[in-house]
Amino acid sequence: MAGQSFEGELRFAVLGPVRAWRDGKEVDLGTPLQRSILAMLLLREGRAVTPTEMIDAVWGEEAPPRALGALRTYVSRLRTVLEPGRAARSRPELLTSVGRGYALRLPEGSLDLTRFERVTHEAEAARRAGKPREAAQALRAALSLFEGEPLAGAVGPYAEHQRDRLVERRISVVETLMDLDLELGEHAAVVSELIALTAEHPLRERLRAQLMLAYYRCGRQGDALAVFTETREALIEELGIEPGPELTTLHQRILAADPTLTVAEVAEEEGPREEEEPTLHLPRPAQLPAAVNDFTGRMEIAGRLRTLLASQSAAEGVPVAAICGIGGVGKTTLAVHVAHAAGDLFPDGQLYADLRGYTDEATGPESALGAFLRALGVPSDVIPERLAERSALFRSLLAERRILVLLDNAHDAEQVSPLLPGSPGCAAIVTSRHKLADLPSARLFDLDVMEPDEALTLFASVAGAARVAAERDAAMDVVAACGFLPLAVRIVAARLAARPSWTVASLVPRLADEQRRLDEMRVGNLAVEATFALGYGHLDTAQSRAFRLLSLPNGPDISVGAAAAVLSASVFDTEDLLESLVDASLLEAPAPGRYRFHDLLKLFARRTLEKTERPQARTMALRRLLGFYLASAQSAHRLAYEGSMIADNLQVDGSGLSFNSVGEAVAWLVAEGDSLFAAINQAAATARAPEPLLPAGDLLVAMEPLLESGTHTREFDQGTRAVLATAKRIGDTGSELRARYVLGRVLFASNRLRQAEEQFRIVHELSVERGEKVVTGEVMNALAVVVGRQRRHAEALTWFDSAMRWYRENGVPAGEALVLSYSARDHLGLGRPEDAIAAAEKGLAIFTEIGSGAGTARARYHLGIVLSRVGRIAEAVHHHAECLAFFRASKQRVWEQRVCSRLAETFIAAGRYPDAVRHAEQALVVSREIGHPYGEALSLMVLGEALKGMGSATRSLDCLRQAFEIFSMLGAPEAEDLRARLGDTPVVDPAVGDADPVVEPVVEL
């Protein structure tokens, strides 16, 4: 809305993907549904939209039950995105509430659709005023605002309808533009454009008529008549109709060679003509390098580049495309290809300069301008000496001309700026390894590696299509080993093409060796390593050290905090260093605050590291990283398990992150999970003594909240076994007991109770032998739970008593509460419900008193089970509902699944079958999401019972059959219970797995 002042300059786009920018930087608009809501608000142009209208627009007839809540969440997120600096609880200025609905108050001129309509209206006014050339220029400027399919990324009925409307609006404007071009005598220039348009819209008779007229005016009467014949056949075949009167009449006039079809002289009333001055006829430069004949892929970015180059409006200035990316990614190849393809847009020629920005002999702007001026016909003896004067003369010569300037391998904006045209009609493409974010008015195009299929096509075009087709799987392995980097793919393919005796498969083991992979990627004067070395050679001391050291960790990416630990630097300095490496295209930033290498760049960085850094420096860098991870995980564990001694007994060397809530701590563990396990496995692979291995064992223990989330079970199994194997090899019993403890937890979670018991017994023996307290109480509690789940209840209570004595001797009230809560199940198993309730209630009271949120939730879980078993249903539901809210908030998915299953069982006992179905289905969803087969089977069994209670016999039977199959595969005794329950219903016995028999549903440790 005019006159409003908002935070930063906002721009919105709907004539292509739904996008937004603040101060020139693109804003993350979130999910497709969120973008769809924003798109609707944008298209309503400040008018209010009710929630009902939005829900119908986005979801249509498939709106979920809680669509209104979801809508409000999306609106809240959009408000945060659009006004990030808005104070909490302050009234939004952009996305406002109007009555029961919402309205988006757009800054004037901020929406591309509004600008499109304004320019088209100006074109209509110019045409009515007898200025067709001005009208045509305006329409081209309007059409350049389209950047692909309108509303791309938006979903729902409203978006589909509006997308169709905008597509129709665009083609209507295109048809008007074609009329103007024909009126201006540009028939020869528009033939190719009309051929493409009629191919895209074969049934639009107006476009067909325009193509016929253009052909006729070019003297191609036969082609014009052929268009009519093709159109008639298409209309009859597709629609069953004859061509309309406009097309038919034009056909007859062409047959009669109507003289009025020739172009009339255009007389625009531009004011009185002045006496024409002598025209300087400048040479037409054509300096582009030859395009590669096997150019592959890149269709989407090539299309966006052409669209930018075609945008020629005085308001938007000279289009400048800055293509950036790592060495070997194909920046020059793409730029040259696009420049050749856009030749029709620049009839006055193309200029090219290799600025050699990454060599020791970079081309200065003065030198490049001198070459350009000579190419434009300026004699050498009159070319000015000073840079500013050369640049001014260059811009003057390009004024009123349509010339494309391609500046290749630029180093920075300072080198490029004097070489840019100054007048609309011209355009420039710049390639650089730097992002050139400071280049005025440049549109940045960050070129990534190829898609797998594109890389495979390039490989086949160089190596031979038949060879690659015969070994497609091996070829895909090869291009994957090349990291889908075009230069690497081309080099390896060229080597294969030059060696007829080689097979594609023979390349795979050669490239699998990371130590030699870069050596395999060289042919003639092309080498991937040499290309990378050019960029590395321009780094300063701090940048080059960071580039080398950050290649050490094996994780898929690294956070700023972790990188700061590796570099032994502050977070602020580290972030500046990493961002400078991103700008130099030597690092990638896949998400805010996270960084990663391209695979081949990482190999190059490691090779450089081995040549320059001492082994001790490398070792210390990895220890600092492991120390940071351990300190952060310790904070997470202490917050998730208030009162536990484990965090206090970890041997932490270094500082890490702190967290404000359990949910935040678990979210960090989940986000960093892959990197944490990579660090653990790397330590296990390289440790030769206990000192570097113990932090990895401690880290496994500290990551216990992640194990409860259920997201990394396989990684825990692999990581604990790796640490255990190394610990046994080097005689490190401290790391061994830690690895065995976590392995026991993993085995217990997968229902291998006997194997879990074996590990816990060894851990207990090692703890007593070493006098180590880190998990002594916890392992006794774990042994009690494991034997109790095998219905050895008396033995379980003996272990619980031992754990209780240990916790009391060491002053750990949280441990006492843990024992009391967990032992309740075994009191029930021995037929002592009063003792069970008393123990569970006392455990809850202690956890509540010490303020342990996690402990309180778990105590409520056990108390709820006991109360449900003795028929106190309402109390059981209350406790389970309370702990479910906690586990969901803290993202502990395993617990969430367990509580939902217990609630479903309780509701079945109460005869509340719909509630039971709802919670059983929630448990089923969670168990499948986290890959928990026993939980899935248990959820299916409970769901089957609930459905049976509702009278849904068929669906109930299907659930019970599925549960039977999973229980049988796990070797769980519930399979036999279900076999008896299913009776005569046919069941199929799946292959029984290696799991130990489970005697009772698994409960947490």
Image: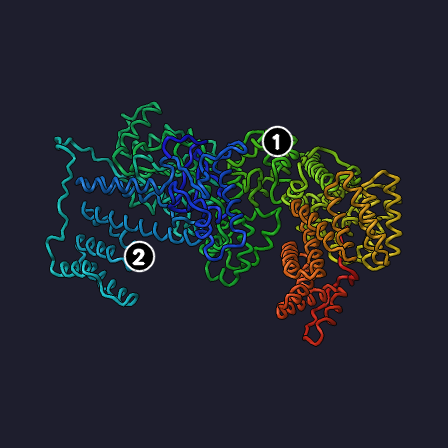
Is disc 2 surrounded by few (<14), some (14 to 19) or many (20+) residues within 10 Å?
Answer: few
Image-based side of 717 in relation to 465, left or right: right
Quarter-of-image position of residue 748: bottom right
* Mark 2 or mark 1, earlier in chain: 2
Image-based side of 723 in relation to 28, left or right: right
Please say if 629 is above or below 827.
Answer: above
Q: Helix, strand or loop at disc 2? A: loop
Residue 108 in picture, x, y percent from top left: 36, 35
Amino acid type of the residue tagged 2 in the rendering: His
Please say if 756 is above or below 848.
Answer: below
Residue 450 in picture, x, y percent from top left: 48, 49
Q: Which residue is drawn at 32% across and 39% down?
A: 404
Which residue has dot 1 on it? 571
Amino acid type of the residue tagged 1 in the rendering: Val
The reply to whether residue 837 is in sight is yes
Quarter-of-image position of residue 792: bottom right
Between 852 and 610, the one lying in front of the other is 852
Image-based side of 108 in relation to 868, left or right: left
Which residue has dot 2 on it? 201
Image-based side of 270 in relation to 779, left or right: left
Q: Between marks 2 and 1, how big is the CA–CA gap?
A: 56 Å
